[in-house]
Structure formats: structure tokens, C-alpha cells
Amino acid sequence: MLLAMLGMAVGTGNIWRFPRIAASNGGGEFLIAWIAFLFLWSIPIILLEFGMGRKTRSGPVKAFMEMMGPRWAWMGAFCVFVTTAITFYYCVVAGWTARYALAAIFKEIPENSPGAFWVSFTSSYSPIIFHALIIGSVSWIVLKGVKSIEKVTSILMPILICLILVLTVRALFLPGAPEGLSFLFTIDWANLAHPKIWVEALIQNAWDTGAGWGLVLCYAAYMRKNEDTTLNAIMLPAANNIVSLLAAIMVFSTVFSAVPQLMEQAKTDPSVLNGLGSLGTAVENGAVFSTELMQKTVFNEGNKGITFIWMPQLFKTMAMGQFFMILFFSALAFAAFTSMIAQVEVTTRAFVDAGMGRTKAVKIICVGVFTLGVPSAIWMPVLDNQDWVWGVALMLAGLFFAISVIPYGVKKFREENLNHSGSNINIGRYWDIIIAFLAPSQMIFLLGWFAYDCYKSAPETWLHPFSSDNIYNVGTILFQWTIAIATLMFLNKWIVRKITDHSNKLKVVEK
């Protein structure tokens, strides 16, 4: 079960997303905020999800009904919807990883222009095909139930962890590794005054650990009553964030080793920079290697940059580069696949709690994820926008989880569901303070601070939901959140009736 949960938590967010977010937010100062939120957000919320799963033995929607009352079922439904909305575009990214793993195995990525391979891939129908293959394969596993999930993750997770360890050790012996590590761990304390770093650190923590997704709650619903809730809740995010840090060490060491070599080769053979975007332009204009150049070019290529354009190019400069490129993209594909399983399971559990058969639920989810993921497969700005909107929504989902336990009683919940007889570690009153006061207040403060900072940065477009010049604005977040929340609030009574009717039928069967 712990391997299954680690498979849920460790995904492309650790390998594809974390290094990019850390680099674009300064490196060391980002790590400070990221570690702080591990203890102030991720671990407390995951403890709460473990306890809710143990107590309610259900998915998020039914759990919210039991904890807060029927009026608040829409909150649990919103948490499920956020996870589902992320699944729409995450499945596309998982398809990218599968395609690149195959391309690495069959040596399809050109020696001198891996950027051209990316352009060729994304301008064809291939992303849609691999998007369909991923959701089809994941749906088949989820259809088989939790035992099938355990079997798959118990095989894939040890392989994934071994691959990451091998790649990290290899990267540490590259010539530019010290410079990469220096960039990752050097702290500019003045940058901690920027709200974007703190917001991105909290979002990444939620991405890394799965806090606020409802994933942990669903898996915990299958655990034994005497399972050590507290130990699992601490081990899971801690192990997961160690994987993220290893991935960042691997990527930064590799990048800082290979980029100077590429820039040197470009003096005699400019073709080595084909398809590498802003770095190629900068080199043509006479730029020299520096950390500032790296931040403006390599680490500023968005969701596709480091992983799908840069890493193939960088592996070409290494001894046994082809072999390590196969390992890298295989690890990435495994990580994406195991996380996808958990995400589809969350939505499936919500439908099952409402009385729908598992087979029918999985089929509906499969078709829905494929259909609503196609825009992200075709248009990169759509994927970037969805990553922005629903990544930030994880903060709101986590806030909903935090306040869900308040009507029940935070202390009572802790004593009954965290400090039970099967737990070897007792959680103190500090958890009550974090959940009841600190978590809600830090979310409200961070969201307000972040909105104000967006307004100062772009006063003309910060509230424009359809701005093509600024797809990362507050307006697009509020617009899409409002539609989702208003719809779920409107359907609240219907959702409650469905879940209540199904629960009553189960009670009759049990009697």
C-alpha cells in the first residue's frame, strides 16, 4: 500500500515540473519556501486525508458529507474535480513521456537537433494518439480494482527509484555538476520577499506530495483500521520530496555540464543549437555562459523546455548518453503512469460512492479524460493555462480539506483517527493549530498577496480571463473556478441524494 501511495505521489511533477519551477524561482530561496510548506502544509493535510480515509472508508465527496454535513458535499466534489481537471492535461504529458521513452529506445531523436524532433512530434497527431493510449491503459488497470493497482505499482516503483538513483549518481560525476549544485542550493535571501516564490513553492508541494488532491484519502480508505496512520503520513511526503530533490540534482548537474560544451561546439558548428529556442538566439547574438543566461533561456522554456528539448540534447554530450537517456525517459514514463492510476481512481471512487458501477464509471472517465484532454494535446497554450489554473486550485482544495474537520472537532479527530492504538507516533496540539488556524490563514494571505502582486505586474491584463498576452493571470483563474464551483453548488442536492441512496442500499445489503 505504501508503494502504491508513493507511486501516486511520485510523478512527472517530481522530474518534469520540480526542476523547472525551482530554477525559474531562484533555486536556493525556492527550496527554503518549499521545505517550509512541507511541514506547514503537505504533512498536516496528508495526515488529515489519512485520517478521513480511515474514518469514512469513502472518496472525498462522501467524506466531506460525513465530516461537514450534506450542505458541503460540493466542496468534496470540487476537490475531485480539481484532480480530474489536472488529469485532462496530465494525461497528455504522460503521453509525451511514453513517446520519448520509445524514441530513446529506437534512437529516433536526431543527434544534432532534438528540438526539431519535439516540433515534429507536437505538430502531428501523435500527442493525441499517445494521450489515448495512456488513458486506455490506465483505465484498464483501475477497472481491475485496488489489487491490480498494488501489483502494478509494486513492480514499477522500485524500478523508478533505482533509475532515479542511477541517473543522479551519474550526473554528480559530470564536469559541471558543482556549478549546477551551487545554483540549486545558493540562497538569495532578498528574493524571499517575492510572493510568487512562496505561492509556487506551495503549489509545487501539493504537486509533489498529492496533498489536497484526495488521492491519499482514497487509498487510505482501503487500509487496515490498525495501520500506522501517522508514520505513513510522514514517510510518504518526506520520501516523495527526497525524490524531487534527487531529480533536481540530476537535472541541474547535467544542464550545467552540457550547456557550456554546446556553446563551445556552436563556435565551429552552429547546427548543434538547432531547435533549442532562446539559447540558440542568445548565442548567435554573442552571449556567454552564465547562470543569468541559463535562467533566461534553458530554464525559461515552459512546460516543454528542460525535459523534452534540453535533456535529449544534454544526454548527447555524455559518455553512454543514449543509455542514460533511455533510463531517464523510462523513469519519467513510469512516474507519469503510476500517478495517472491514482488520479483516475479518485474520480472513479466518487462515481462509485454515488451508486454507479465501477465498470461504467471507468468507461465514462476514460472517454471524458480523452475528450477534454485533446485541446491540451493540440495547443500548448491550453496546457500551460490549465496547469496554471488547476495547479493554483490545489491551494483552494487543500483549504477545503483543512476546514472540513473543524465542524467535527480538530482535537477529537486527531485523538480518534491519528493517535489511535495502531499509531506509534502521537501527533500533538500543534497539528490542531496548523489545521484550524495556520493553514486557512496562510492560504487566504498567500492568495491575496499573490493577486496583488499580479495586479502590480500587469495592471491591464491581470483580471482579463481571455488575454492572449498573459495566460497566467488572476482573471482566468477566477473565471474557471467560478464556473466549476457554481455548477457543483447547483448540483449539491442531486449529489447528496445519489450518495445517500447508494449508502442506504449498502446498509440494507449488509443487514
Image (spheres, rainbow, N blue to C red):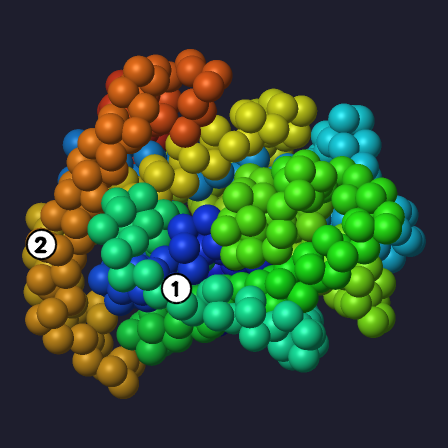
Q: Amino acid at mark 2?
A: Phe
**Proximity of marks 2 and 1: CB atoms separated by less than 8 Å:** no
Across and down, in percent, residue 64 comes to: 24, 44
Q: Classify 10 Å Cα crowding around label 2: few (below 14), some (14-19), many (20 and above).
A: few
Q: Is residue 138 left or right of residue 295?
A: right
Q: Residue at x 35, y 65 (%)?
A: 187
* Residue at image point 32% right, 24% down: 458
Instruction: Compute the Cα span from label 2 to label 1.
Output: 28 Å
The residue lying furthest to the front in this view is: 286
Task: Locate residue 504: give its quadrant.
Answer: top left
Q: Write down the quadrant of residue 465 in the picture.
A: top left
Label ID, residue 58: none
The numbered mark, 2 or 1, whose residue comes first in the sequence reads 1
What secondary structure is found at the residue carrying circle 1?
helix
Q: Relative to residue 227, is residue 507 depicted above or below? A: above
Instruction: Judge from the rendering whether residue 148 lies leftward or rightward of residue 497; answer left or right.
Output: right
In this figure, what is the number of numbered marks?
A: 2
Q: Residue furthest bottom?
A: 424
Where in the figure is residue 184, as x and y percent of width and height?
47, 65
Residues 185 and 59: in front is: 185
- The residue where tag 2 is placed is 437
Q: Amino acid at mark 1?
A: Gly
Q: Residue at x 9, y 62 (%)?
A: 433
Circle 1 is placed at which residue position? 28
Query: Counting other residues with Cα less than 10 Å from the Cα at mark 1, is it few (<14), some (14-19), or many (20 or more)?
Result: many
Q: Position of residue 14 (x, y in %)?
A: 52, 58
Mark 2 against mark 1, which lies toward the viewer? Answer: 1
Where is residue 243? Give x, y as percent. 52, 69
Q: Is residue 484 left or right of residue 290?
A: left
Identify the residue shown where x is 58% and y is 63%.
Answer: 252
Residue 132, placed above or below residue 202: above
